[in-house]
């Protein structure tokens, strides 16, 4: 949970190649989402081309009306004028209807894309290995799902269609002006220079501003999530004041970047209007001189002025959408990064069948290190026959949990292999492995829902009677019945609060219902006080019977129910034998055992 180390993705400067790679990666993602909607997008393109042509036809029709139909009307022949007016109206109406359908289609496409992206993120992050989640904090995953998706949504819902309409409109307007009056077109062309400079400056500045703003907002979310998920530690260490100050600093940064963005808009918008007005004046001046000389019709001049004026209309929208485009594309870059992460423990292509495991575990020359860290397990060879109950003891950091995580295949060994009934775990299908190997940890996480739902997680589809039988077997039935709604009590609702010990019993019932061949308890009874532990001892015995069990425990009382004790130190098993053998020997365990015995009297 360190704040510094988790943000480097946003903070480090990327090399050219890296950023090219990232852009290609997010283009690929975009393409993969759009390509199934080819036909719809094609239809949308046709609609927008037609509707823009109709819109741009307006001023040209006005020129026709003034220079051709009006003189006829003055001479009494009004027919042409009617036709021109009718044409103008139909073009306007048709363009409105077409643009409506275009916007409807793009809105549907956007919604579909957003839905797809949200789903892919959820499914994918859930599928990723423990290794990913230990490296990529929950705060960052949440930032991807919330603020990043939000900025993509803003672009898609707010303006993708508008952006396309605006750009096409500018292009078509310029073409129409070129066809109608090339000299006015040249004047417009000159205006593109200041427009280009201003817009480029604006883009560079807002790009910078947006990037900073996004980093600041990601930090805010992350800090908030980490403070709230660690609220107990915050309270216990009276960290509220310091957190407040830190959070205040983050909010202030965020505000500062927003203020800068607002200022940039404050400069860009009036600049745009100014350039537009100067261009119109220039077209009027140049065109007016030519009208005086009789080189240009008044109608054409009117149309040219209208085109020059309307040319700048979409610019402001485009500039705004450019911003949301910027932040959406950087969000998409990050999301594509998460979607590209591969599970480090991949599902086998052709899994070896494993109908019902016996539960024999072997370590063959296993070595393990986390990522590029130090070696945590050194050359481990170990055979655990099916049905044996093992107590794994040793100092903190000896590698006990790591050994347990390897048996559950949360990680793959760096060298050698872990086998279940002689089959390398890498070749066992995930569903088989999850059914046969269950690990209960100290956390004993309860999901929202009823007590029965939480037990059912062990074996979805089990009957209610089986749930009750499982609870009875581990000694949880009595307290569950005393809850306000018994088995239907919502664990998150008032009255449904259960103590750490009760939570532990529920997770035992869950494991009992799952009925795995191999059960691992990693400090699972550590959160219980001594009376509660005594209470679960009986349940524990039932739970461990008829299966391979590995118990990692602080308290040596648990050792008495084991067939065999393994003592670990610095990633090695240094003692291995029955509890009686080891206790009567002269090793580490004997010392620990003696000290523990003495403490009891
Ligand atoms: N996710 C992890 N990433 C890097 N190192 C880890 C990780 N988990 C544990 N370690 C390191 O591996 C060693 C063994 O840890 P662990 O197996 O949890 O010990 P134990 O359960 O016996 O207390 C320790 O040095 C610990 O710092
Ligand atoms: Mg541990």
Image (cartoon, rainbow, N blue to C red):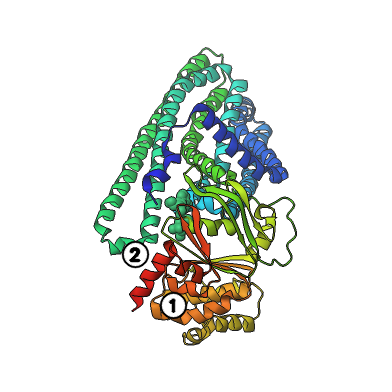
Name the side, left or right, on which 66 lies relative to 274.
right
The foreground one among 513 and 414 is: 414
Name the side, left or right, on which 243 lies relative to 213.
left
Residue occupying image coordinates x 32% and y 47% = 250
Assign a secondary structure to mark 2.
Answer: helix
The foreground one among 315 and 544 is: 544
> Mark 1 or 2 closer to N-term?
2
- The label shown at residue 533 is 1
Q: How many marks?
A: 2
| Residue that sits furthest to the front in the current view | 585
Residue occupying image coordinates x 36% and y 35% = 264
| Location of residue 70 in the rendering, given as x and y in whole percent from the top left corner | 61, 29
Please identify the quarter of the rendering in which residue 295 is found: top right
Please identify the quarter of the rendering in which residue 12 is found: top left
Residue occupying image coordinates x 59% and y 80% = 470
Q: Quadrant of the C terminus?
A: bottom left
The foreground one among 82 and 551 is: 551
376 is higher (above) or lower (below) than 71: below
| Location of residue 380 in the rendering, given as x and y in whole percent from the top left corner | 56, 52
Respond yes or no on whether mark 2 lies under 8 Å from ligand 2.
no
In 3D space, how far apart are the residues under numbered discs 1 and 2 (Cα atoms)?
Answer: 24 Å
Residue occupying image coordinates x 67% and y 32% = 80
Contact? badges 1 and 2 (CB < 8 Å): no
* Residue at which label 2 appears: 232
Assign a secondary structure to mark 1.
Answer: helix
| Location of residue 590 in the rendering, given as x and y in whole percent from the top left corner | 42, 66
Closer mark to the observer between disc 1 and disc 2: 1
Residue 496 seen by the camera: no
Please identify the quarter of the rendering in which residue 528 is found: bottom left
221 is higher (above) or lower (below) than 49: below
| Location of residue 180 in the rendering, given as x and y in whole percent from the top left corner | 61, 22
- The label shown at residue 309 is none
């Amino acid at each position: 949970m360190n704040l510094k180390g988790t943000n480097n993705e946003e903070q480090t400067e990327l090399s050219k190649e890296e950023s090219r790679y990232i852009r290609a990666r997010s283009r690929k993602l975009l393409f993969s989402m759009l390509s199934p909607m080819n036909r719809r997008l094609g239809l949308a393109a046709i609609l927008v081309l037609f509707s823009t042509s109709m819109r741009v036809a307006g001023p040209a029709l006005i020129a026709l009306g003034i220079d051709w139909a009006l003189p006829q009307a003055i001479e009494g022949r009004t027919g042409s004028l009617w036709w021109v007016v009718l044409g103008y109206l139909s073009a306007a109406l048709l363009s409105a209807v077409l643009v409506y359908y275009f916007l409807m289609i793009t809105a549907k496409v956007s919604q579909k894309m957003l839905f797809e992206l949200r789903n892919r993120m959820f499914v994918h992050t859930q599928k990723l290995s423990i290794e990913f989640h230990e490296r990529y904090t929950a705060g960052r995953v949440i930032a991807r799902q919330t603020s990043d998706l939000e900025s993509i949504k803003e672009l898609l819902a707010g303006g993708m269609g508008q952006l396309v309409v605006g750009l096409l409109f500018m292009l078509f307007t310029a073409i129409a002006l070129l066809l109608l009056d090339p000299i006015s077109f040249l004047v417009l062309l000159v205006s593109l220079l200041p427009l280009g400079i201003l817009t480029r400056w604006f883009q560079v500045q807002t790009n910078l501003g947006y990037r900073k703003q996004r980093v600041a907002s990601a930090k805010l979310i992350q800090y908030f999530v980490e403070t709230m998920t660690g609220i107990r530690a915050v309270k216990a260490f009276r960290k509220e004041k310091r957190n407040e100050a830190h959070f205040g600093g983050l909010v202030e940064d965020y505000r500062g970047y927003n203020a800068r963005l607002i200022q940039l808009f404050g400069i860009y918008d009036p600049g745009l209007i100014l350039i537009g007005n100067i261009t119109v004046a220039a077209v009027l001046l140049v065109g007016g001189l030519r009208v005086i000389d009789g080189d240009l019709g008044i109608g054409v001049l009117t149309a040219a002025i209208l085109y020059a004026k309307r040319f700048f209309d979409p610019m402001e929208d485009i500039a705004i959408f450019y911003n949301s485009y910027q932040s959406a594309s950087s969000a998409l870059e990050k999301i594509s990064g998460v979607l590209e992460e591969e599970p480090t423990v991949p599902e086998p292509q052709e899994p070896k069948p494993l109908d019902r495991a016996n539960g024999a575990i072997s370590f063959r020359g296993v070595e393990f290190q986390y990522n590029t860290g130090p070696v945590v397990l050194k050359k481990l060879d170990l055979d655990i026959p099916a049905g044996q109950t093992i107590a794994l003891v040793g100092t903190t950091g000896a590698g006990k949990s790591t050994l347990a995580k390897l048996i559950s295949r949360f990680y793959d060994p760096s060298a050698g292999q872990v086998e279940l009934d002689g089959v390398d775990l890498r070749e066992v299908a995930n569903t088989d492995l999850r059914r046969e190997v269950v690990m209960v940890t100290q956390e004993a996480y309860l999901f929202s829902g009823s007590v029965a739902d939480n037990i059912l997680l062990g074996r979805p589809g089990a009957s209610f009677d089986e749930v009750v039988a499982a609870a009875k077997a581990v000694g949880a039935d009595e307290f569950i019945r005393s809850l306000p709604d018994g088995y239907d009590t919502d664990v998150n609702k008032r009255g449904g609060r259960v103590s750490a010990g009760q939570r532990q019993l529920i997770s035992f019932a869950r494991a009992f219902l799952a009925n795995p061949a191999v059960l691992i308890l990693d400090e699972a009874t550590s959160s219980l006080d001594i009376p509660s532990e005594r209470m679960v001892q009986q349940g524990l015995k039932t739970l461990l019977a008829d299966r391979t069990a590995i118990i990692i425990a602080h308290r040596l009382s648990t050792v008495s129910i084991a067939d065999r004790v393994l003592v670990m130190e610095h990633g090695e098993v240094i003692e291995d034998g029955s509890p009686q053998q080891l206790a009567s020997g002269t090793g580490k365990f004997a010392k620990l055992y003696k000290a523990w015995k003495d403490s009891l009297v």
